[in-house]
Image: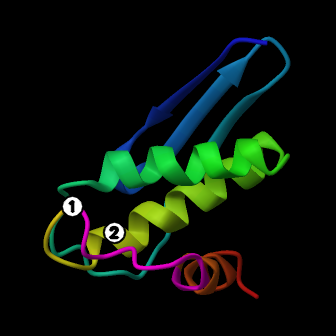
């Protein structure tokens, strides 16, 4: 199935395919220091979700959380250091 995913910056992301239309809000309450690499990190989070069999909503949340971790540090590769860091951001994002 073909799916379109559009990252919409601080608004989150938009996902559309023949079965659904989702608008998933971004992580709130973070201070963005540097947005370089946010898109790449978003993509890596989304793809990671796909590869582990998550729903599109779960993939979007994981992608948003990964991007949120990324923008809190300077540079494209310094923010996201490990999966545990992203999982902690994801728990906070989902209100757990």
Identify the mark at residue 76; answer none if there is no mark. Answer: 1
Position of 35 relative to 53 (above/below)? below
Residue 25 visible in the displayed image:
no
Residue range highlighted in magenta: 77-85
Residues 36 and 25: in front is: 36
x and y, in percent, of residue 80 in the image: 39, 74
Describe residue 49's horizontal placement relative to residue 28 as left or right: right
Neighbour tally class for label 2: few under 14, some 14-19, many 20 plus, Cα within 10 Å: many
Position of 30 relative to 42 (above/below)? below
Position of 84 relative to 66 (above/below)? below
The residue that appears at 76% across and 41% down in the rendered structure is: 56
The residue that appears at 60% across and 84% down in the rendered structure is: 84
x and y, in percent, of residue 69 in the image: 40, 74
Q: Quadrant of the N terminus?
A: top right
Q: Are marks 1 and 2 in contact (CB under 8 Å)?
A: yes
First of labels 1, 2 by sequence position: 2
Marks 1 and 2 sit apart, C-alpha to C-alpha, by 7 Å
Describe residue 54's horizontal placement relative to residue 82 as left or right: right
Q: Quadrant of the C terminus?
A: bottom right
Quadrant in the picture for residue 22: top right
Label 2, secondary structure: give it: helix
Residues 94 and 52: in front is: 52
x and y, in percent, of residue 33 in the image: 16, 75
The residue that appears at 34% across and 46% down in the rendered structure is: 39
């Amino acid at each position: 199935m073909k799916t379109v995913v559009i990252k919409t910056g601080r608004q989150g992301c938009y996902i559309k395919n023949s079965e659904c239309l989702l608008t998933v809000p971004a992580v709130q309450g973070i201070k963005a220091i540097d947005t370089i690499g946010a898109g790449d990190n978003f993509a890596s989070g989304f793809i990671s979700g796909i590869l582990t069999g998550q729903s599109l909503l779960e993939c979007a949340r994981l992608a948003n959380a990964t991007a949120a971790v990324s923008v809190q540090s300077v540079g494209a590769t310094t923010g996201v250091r490990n999966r545990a860091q992203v999982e902690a951001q994801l728990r906070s994002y989902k209100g757990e």
